[in-house]
Image (tube, coloured by chain):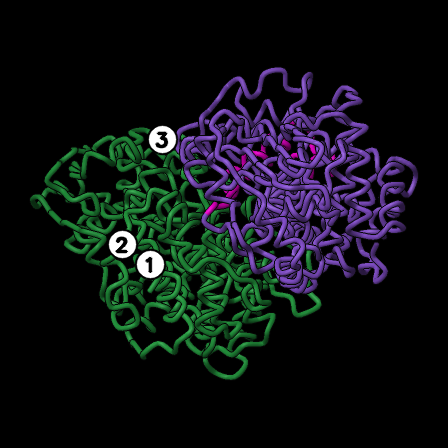
Chain colours: A purple, B green
C-alpha cells in the first residue's frame, strides 16, 4: 500500500474517538484563532487579505481574520499567513513544524463555504493535523536540514486531508488529492525572517483547498506521489522513516503539540518558565541580586542579545527578558517588547546582573536558572517538552488569549470553540474571526 | 546583484524591440490558443474548469477555455492545465520545458481582469517567456534529472514575471514577486502520465498570478531566494549556471522554442519530418517496399511500440506512425490515433515492413529514414532543432491549427492573434478562447 493510499484511507475514515486528541485539538483551535486575531494588523496579513478580497465564490465564500470574505482557497491563504504572522502559534517538535496554521485555515474556509457542521470540522482537523504530523515525521529532520520548511511542506498534506474531509471525499478521492498536493507542497527556510515564512503556512492551506477541490472534481494523479521515484520524498531530502506511519488511526502524534506562552523567540521559553518557578519561590525584581541562566550552547547564536535596543532585539535576549519576567512584565504580550522596555533604567540594571552560561549538559529544550537573593539562591529547571498537563495548558492558553485579545473577547472565543459541535457552532466561531480587533484589549 | 533583482529589473523594464522574439511570441500565442481549444474536453481540463468556476473576482474575472469566468488565479490554473492537456504545446529544449502553458495563462487572465492593452500583454509575454527560459537554463539539466518538471518550476518564475508586468510592478516589486514564488515553484516528474503533468503547468500559472498580486499588495521576501543558502536553486538540484543570465535584455533565448506538428510522442517527430522529405521525393504507401528508420537508442524504450492496438499506443509507435504518414493520414490530427487505425489491414501490412534501428551516431533530436521503392532507395534526414525558418513554422502552425479547430476558427484565431496590439485586441482573442469548440472542425 502506498503512503498516499494509507493516508487517504485514514483521512476518509471516521477516526476512533480519542479524548486526548480532541482536547488538544480544541486548544489548538482556540490558540490559532487567538494569534490570528492578534496578528491581523501585521503587514503580511494586510497584504494577503488585500489579495484575498479580490476573490469570491459563487459556491460559498469564507471569512477572513479582520472581516471580509473571499473564495475558500484565497481565504485559506490569507488566514494561514495571518495566523503565522506573529510566529506565536503552536509547534510540533516531532515533525519540526507548525501544524495549525496550515491545516485549520483550509478546513475552516471550506467548512464555512459548504455549510459543514462543527462535528465535521472537528473530524477534518483530527485527520488533517495528524496527517501533517505523520508526513512530517516521515520526511524527518533530514528534510528540514535540506532547507525545507515543514510547516509549508508537511502542512500542505495535512491541509489537503482536512479540506478533503470537509468535502466528504472517499478514500480513493482522498488518495488522489494527497497525490496531487505532492507536486505542489513547498516552502523554503531561506524565507525565514521575511513575510515568506508566514506566507508558507498560507500557501500550504491554499494548495490543500485547491487539491481537495480538484480531486472532488475528478482529477487524478499517481498513488506513488510521496515515495516513488522522482516523487516528493526522494526529491526533497526525505528520510522515508517507515516507522512514522505505524499505528496510523490508532495512536496519535498530534497531542504532543507545544504552545507558545511568550511572545518571543522559542529559545527563551524554557528560561521564562524556569523563572516562573523561582518567582513562585519568592524571587522578584527587588530581592534579586544576580541571575545565572544555563542553556544549551546552540541557543547562544540565536537569542543571546546582551543589550537589546529595539523591540525585535528584545525578543532575542535572555538577559532582558529575564529582567522583564522578574519585574512582573507580561512576556505573553506583544507591546511589552519595545524600545521603551529596552531602555527602562530598572530593567537595564537588572539585565546587567544576568549571566548566560552555555552548558552542553542542558537539553536544547530546557533551561536552568539560579537567582541569588538575600535569603539564598533560588533554583528552578524547566524543559518545554514537559509542558503536557492539559489543565495547566488550558489555564496558560486562556491567560495568553486574554493578554492578546482582552478578557471579554478571549472568554467568548473559548466558549465558542468549546461549543463548536453544537448547531451553528461554526457560525459563532466565524463571527469571532471576522470581528475587527477589539479596541479595549486587556 | 541577486538573480531575483536582475530578473526583476529585466521584467519591469521595457524590453528592446526584437522582431524575431515578437514573431515567435505570436506563433506561441496562436499555438497555445489552438491546443487549449483542442484540449477543452479532456478530463483534466474539465476538472480544473469545474474548480475554477467555483471562484470569481469583484475586481474583474477572467475567461476560461470553453466558456465561463473565474478569479484570475483560478482561471490561470484551469487554462494552463487545459492547454497542456494534450501535450501538444510548444517546447524549449534549452530549458527542458514547455514555456507557453505556464506563462500565457497567467498574463492573459490578469490582462483580461485588469483591462490591460494588447501591447501590455505582448510585453508581459516577452519578459515572462524569457524569464522562464533564463531560470530554466540557470537550473539546467541537473534540476530536471533530480526529478523536477521544469514546466512547473521555471514556468512559475516566468508566469510571475508576466503577471507582474501586466500589473505594472516596478523593479523592486517584481524582485519581491520573484522571491516569493521561489518558495512556491514546484512540479515533479513522477506525475508524468497522470493529470498531474498538465496540472503542473496550471499550478505554475496560478502561483505566478498570486505572487504578483501579493507583491502588488506589499508582500516582501528575501532577494536571495533563488541562489542563497536553503533557497530554490540549492534545494532543487539546480546547476547554478551563471552563463544562463548573460546578455539578459539584449539577447533572447525564447525564439529557440520548438513546436509540435504531430499529435504523438516527441520522439517520433524527427522521423515524421524526415518522411515528409521522402514523400516529397515521391514515396507513398503504394510504391513503398520497406522502410528503415534510424534513431537514437534512447528513444527505443520510449516510443517503439512495434504493433500498437490502442490510440494511445499508436502515439508511441515508430512503425505505425511511419505507415500512417506514408499512407497520407494527417498525423497532426487527434482522432487519427485510434484503435481503427491500429487494425486497418493496409496500415498493418506497411507497418510490418518498417524496421527501427538504434544508431548512436544519430542525435536524439534527429532521425534518418530510407524508403525502398521500385525506383530505388529514397533517403531523408531531419533534426527537429533545425526547424527554425519562421515562414515554414508559420505555415505548419496554421496547418496544425486548421486540422485541430477547423479552417474558419483557425483563420479567425490567427487574425486575432496578429491584431492583438490593436484596440480591443485582447477582447477579440478572449472571445475565441471562451468559445465552445466548433462542431464543424476541419
As drawn, which residue projects farthest toward the right?
Answer: A423
Q: Nearer the viewer, residue B347 or B79?
A: B79
At x 25%, y 69%, the residue is B251
Residue B44: say if magenta: no
**Which quadrant holds the C terminus of chain B?**
bottom left
Note whether residue A106 is visible.
no
Residue neighbourhood size for the residue with mark 2, other residues' Cα within 10 Å, grouped as few (<14), some (14–19), many (≥20): some
Q: Chain of mark 2?
A: B
Q: Chain of mark 3?
A: B
* Prevailing secondary structure of the magenta residues: helix
At x 74%, y 22%, the residue is A15
Q: Nearer the viewer, residue B134 or B39?
A: B134
Residue neighbourhood size for the residue with mark 3, other residues' Cα within 10 Å, grouped as few (<14), some (14–19), many (≥20): many
Return the x and y of residue B306 as percentages of the image width and height: 29, 29
| Dot 2 and dot 1 residues touching (CB under 8 Å) | yes
Q: Which mark is residue A79?
A: none
Q: Are marks 2 and 1 on the same chain?
A: yes
Q: Which residues are magenta?
A: A161-189
As drawn, which residue projects farthest toward the left?
Answer: B376
Q: Which mark is residue B308?
A: 3
Q: Earlier in the sequence, mark 3 or mark 1?
A: 1
Residue behind mark 2: B94
Q: Are marks 3 and 2 on the same chain?
A: yes
Amino acid at each position: 500500500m502506498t503512503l498516499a493510499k494509507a493516508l487517504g484511507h485514514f483521512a476518509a475514515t471516521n477516526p476512533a474517538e480519542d479524548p486526548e486528541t480532541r482536547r488538544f485539538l480544541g486548544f489548538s483551535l482556540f490558540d490559532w484563532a487567538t494569534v490570528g486575531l492578534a496578528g491581523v494588523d501585521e503587514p503580511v496579513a494586510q497584504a494577503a487579505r488585500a489579495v484575498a478580497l479580490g476573490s469570491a465564490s459563487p459556491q460559498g465564500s469564507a471569512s477572513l481574520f479582520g472581516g471580509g470574505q473571499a473564495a475558500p482557497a484565497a481565504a485559506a491563504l490569507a488566514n494561514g499567513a495571518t495566523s503565522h504572522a506573529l510566529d506565536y502559534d503552536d509547534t510540533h517538535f516531532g515533525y519540526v513544524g507548525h501544524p495549525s496554521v496550515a491545516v485549520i485555515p483550509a478546513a475552516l474556509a471550506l467548512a464555512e463555504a459548504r455549510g459543514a457542521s462543527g462535528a465535521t470540522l472537528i473530524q477534518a482537523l483530527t485527520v488533517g493535523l495528524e496527517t501533517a504530523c505523520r508526513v512530517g515525521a516521515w520526511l524527518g529532520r533530514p528534510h528540514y536540514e535540506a532547507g525545507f520548511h515543514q510547516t509549508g511542506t508537511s502542512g500542505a498534506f495535512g491541509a489537503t486531508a482536512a479540506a478533503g474531509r470537509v468535502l466528504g471525499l472517499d478514500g480513493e478521492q482522498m488518495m488522489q488529492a494527497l497525490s496531487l498536493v505532492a507536486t505542489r507542497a513547498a516552502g523554503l527556510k531561506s524565507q525565514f525572517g521575511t513575510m515568506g515564512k508566514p506566507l508558507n503556512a498560507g500557501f500550504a492551506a491554499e494548495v490543500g483547498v485547491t487539491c481537495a477541490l480538484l480531486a472532488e472534481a475528478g482529477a487524478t494523479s499517481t498513488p506513488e506521489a510521496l515515495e516513488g521515484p522522482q516523487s516528493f520524498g526522494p526529491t526533497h531530502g526525505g528520510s522515508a522513516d517507515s516507522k512514522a506511519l505505524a499505528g496510523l488511526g490508532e495512536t496519535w502524534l498530534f497531542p504532543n503539540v507545544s504552545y507558545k506562552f511568550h511572545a518571543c523567540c522559542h529559545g527563551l521559553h524554557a528560561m521564562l518558565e524556569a523563572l516562573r518557578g523561582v518567582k513562585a519561590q519568592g524571587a522578584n525584581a527587588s530581592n534579586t541580586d544576580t541571575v545565572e541562566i544555563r542553556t544549551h550552547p546552540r541557543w547562544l547564536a540565536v537569542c543571546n542579545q546582551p543589550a537589546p535596543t529595539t523591540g525585535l532585539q528584545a525578543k532575542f535576549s535572555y538577559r532582558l527578558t529575564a529582567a522583564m519576567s522578574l519585574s512582573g512584565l507580561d512576556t505573553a504580550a506583544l507591546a511589552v517588547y519595545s524600545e521603551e522596555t529596552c531602555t527602562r533604567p530598572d530593567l537595564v540594571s537588572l539585565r546587567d546582573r544576568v549571566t548566560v552560561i552555555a552548558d552542553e549538559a542542558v537539553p536544547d529544550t530546557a533551561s536552568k536558572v539560579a537567582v541569588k537573593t538575600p535569603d539564598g539562591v533560588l533554583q528552578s529547571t524547566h524543559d518545554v517538552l514537559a509542558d503536557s498537563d492539559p489543565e495547566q495548558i488550558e489555564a496558560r492558553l486562556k491567560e495568553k488569549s486574554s493578554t492578546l485579545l482582552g478578557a471579554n473577547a478571549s472568554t467568548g472565543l473559548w466558549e465558542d470553540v468549546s461549543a463548536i459541535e453544537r448547531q451553528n457552532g461554526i457560525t459563532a466561531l466565524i463571527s469571532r474571526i471576522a470581528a475587527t480587533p477589539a479596541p479595549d484589549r486587556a
